[in-house]
Image: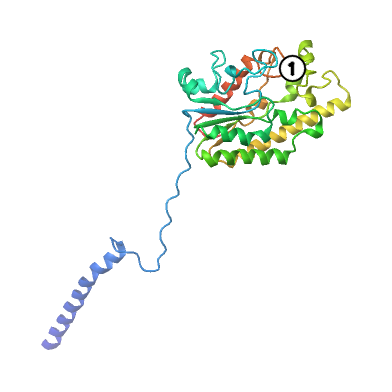
Amino acid sequence: MRDTGRSRVRAAVATVTAVLLAAPLVACDATGGNSPAPKGAPAADPTPKPTPAWNSRPGSVAAVGDSITRGFDACTVLSDCPEVSWSTGTDPEVRSLAVRLLGKDRAAERSWNYAETGARMAALPEQMERAAAKSPELVTVMVGANDACRGALRAMTPVAEFRRDFEDALRTLRGKAPKAQVYVASVPDLKRLWSEGRGNAMGKQVWKLGICPTMLGDPDDMGGEAVERRSTVQDRVVAYNKVLEEVCAKDQHCRYDDGAVFDYRFGTDQLSHWDWFHPSKDGQSRLAELAFRAVTAEEER
């Protein structure tokens, strides 16, 4: 009985000792410590990089586009007046986007206007190439009115072509300035401009010189064909704006104005008193204000 008792004691001690010796090994495996992961275990997925934030205070501005950005007919008849441009102008009455962002002195040194009167979307890639050479932090785009303002409806830029040229313009910019931000203004409501300006006799005389014939031709004609013609132009502008919105949405550094320019109700004070179609100084200032709101908004639009 005594030998049996001692045997039982020794067996119990041996069992407890084995458990105690094994316990640290189990604890180490459970917690992991600095031990390498078991062979064959999948590596943890890297933390995705956050989308770059929009810089609401860019340090330089380049403008591309058409006659609106050149300040056409805002100072003298049938002439450019870039100093009143909504994007890069220096006129204190306008307070351009560049002036609002950079201040007067810096705007004069750090803003460039490559827009051209009469330009259509097809001209934008070349303008973008010139703008990209300056490595701007922000590029403003306002183009498309001339694609609808043609001598005949059949001459309006097809929507697919308009899209292709805009995509090409953004690719051109990204090739030289991959991080440049882009503000895209919608095409103005041309039908509203016709409605506002048609009451001015002098304006209608200037329209006869060839300003937007598809919309402004025979401005007092309210017959079926004329009404349908204007509606067709209006539909094309809406389609162009849809393209601007969709293409811009695919670029993480691009902001579309959500139709702010198209929706703006330009009145006679905002229209040139030379042609009653292009923006006056006051109209240019309103465009600058809309752009400033969009560019400086903290939340991505």
* Nearest to the observer: residue 17 or residue 46: 46
Query: Can residue 190 be seen?
Result: yes
State which quadrant residue 285 falls in.
Answer: top right
Residue shown at 35% from the left, 67% from the top: 38
State which quadrant residue 237 falls in.
Answer: top right
Residue 125 picture location, percent across and down:
62, 36
State which quadrant residue 25 falls in.
Answer: bottom left
Q: Is residue 280 left or right of residue 5?
A: right
Residue shown at 62% from the left, 22% from the top: 70
* Nearest to the observer: residue 249 or residue 14: 249
**Farthest residue in the left direction?**
2
Q: Is residue 98 left or right of residue 244?
A: left
Residue shown at 62% from the left, 35% from the top: 126
What type is the residue that disc 1 sits on?
Glu
Decide: is 249 above or below 188. below
Point out the image quarter for the N terminus: bottom left
Decide: is 283 above or below 15. above
Residue 8 picture location, percent across and down:
17, 83
* Nearest to the observer: residue 93 or residue 177: 177
Q: Is residue 273 left or right of residue 55?
A: right
Check the image and tell me how it is coloured.
Answer: rainbow
* Nearest to the observer: residue 186 or residue 91: 91
Q: Is label 1 in a helix, a strand or a loop?
A: helix
Residue shown at 74% from the left, 30% from the top: 148
Decide: is 34 above or below 301. below
Point out the image quarter for the C terminus: top right
Query: Can residue 285 be seen?
Result: no
Q: According to the image, label 1 marks what residue?
A: 196
Residue 128 picture location, percent across and down:
58, 34
Residue 77 picture location, percent across and down:
70, 13
Crowding at mark 1 (Cα within 10 Å: few <14, some 14-19, many 20+)? some
